[in-house]
Image (cartoon, rainbow, N blue to C red):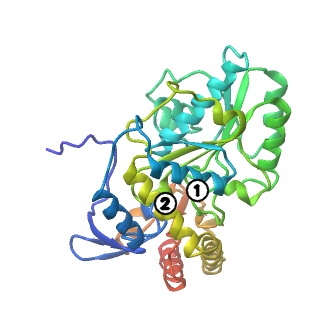
Amino acid sequence: MNHLMETYKRLPVAFTEGSGCWLQDADGKRYLDALTGIAVCGLGHAHPAITKAISDQAGSLLHTSNLYELPLQSELADRLCELSGMDRVFFANSGAEANEAAIKIARLHGHQKGQSRPATIVVDGSFHGRTMATLTATGNRKVQAGFEPLLSGFVRAPFNDLQAIRQIAENTNEVSALFVEPVLGEGGIVIPDDEYLPGLRKICDDNGWLLMLDEVQTGNGRTGAYFAYQHTAILPDVVTTAKGLGNGVPIGACLARGEAATTFQPGNHGSTFGGNPLACAAAIAVLDTLEKDGLIQRAAELGDRIVDGLRENLKGNNMVRTVRGKGLMIAVELEEPCGELVAEALQAGILINVTQDTIVRLLPALTMSDKEADELVSRVSALIQG
């Protein structure tokens, strides 16, 4: 009997070790990892700087709780605020928890402004997590099905549609915030128009709303900027991140500035494990490595190389609708459902993901070499060509 709850339909492989962009299973077979634990291991597997940080910290102090001062947490908060333009940080254990904190900030902010039922605008195709609040905010009925009644306090709009947001503003005075991914991740690597985020910033400013960005997947250098909003000139009021921040050690962060940064007061929110010394040591090592090795710019260059290679190899294939990407968030969208490619890729020694039924999603490590990037292009192209 398998005593695990069947929340995952697992593939028939168990990995025993990893190094850089490669994983190895119990039989010694090697796999090129183009998924990195769903955008988590941005520095690849067993990175020496992360290994040393974890080992050193485990040898001194793992956890004391947030009842006491945590110098590493303060150091990490300083670094993240410097990188982001934010003022303060709340640390959690995951992207869902970071997003939960953002939703609570939006609601408390609305009540503090005198709104009796403050609402947050969310968009179709989004994914924010699987807690009750974050799955309600998510724009995907498959995630929500069976968990009704969903929470109230959310207003839905199409993604990449500024006019829809303007119409909401004209018809309600109960909105306190707008929450959106700069690039839809689980939604299929959907990249909005260049004017979308600046347009949202203006609408929020005009209406006194918080602009909140979910950068759980897009953050930590993956798109070729530390945060994806930094491809524009805007600043959000709240931004969340997780995944690549700890390179495999669970950590999430909700960053805020201005009024949003002081909305929480003692007793409003908390976390037992959030931002403990081990997680913060790992995250600081990630930030050090991203900076020292120039990996954020490298993500932009690698992304262009992979997208260009896939477009060249797949041109003329009538089954390919489009190849697109933002840094190392890359999608090959096909004309028909292609879920079977995940198992076929595993057999071929490469890890990929299929989302929205027809989209091959690639989230490789920022540390990938040119040779490995070209091998990724070759293997994925062969897989799609059949």
Secondary structure of residue under mark 2: helix
Residue 213, image x and y in percent?
A: 65, 44
Q: Residue at x 48, y 37 (%)?
A: 143
Q: Is 386 on the left-hand or right-hand side of 10?
A: right
Mark 1 neighbour density, 10 Å: few (under 14) some (14–19) many (20 or more): some
Q: How many marks?
A: 2
Front-lying residue, 86 or 7: 86
Residue 59, image x and y in percent?
A: 27, 59
Residue identifier under label 2: 284
Q: Residue at x 52, y 30 (%)?
A: 133
Front-lying residue, 227 or 268: 268
Residue 111 visible: yes
Q: Are marks 1 and 2 in contact (CB under 8 Å)?
A: yes
Secondary structure of residue under mark 1: helix
Question: Which numbered dot is residue 79?
Answer: 1
Mark 2 neighbour density, 10 Å: few (under 14) some (14–19) many (20 or more): many
Q: Is residue 221 above or below residue 217?
A: below
Q: Is 48 on the left-hand or right-hand side of 304?
A: left
What is the quadrant of residue 21 in the picture? bottom left
Q: Residue at x 55, y 84 (%)?
A: 370
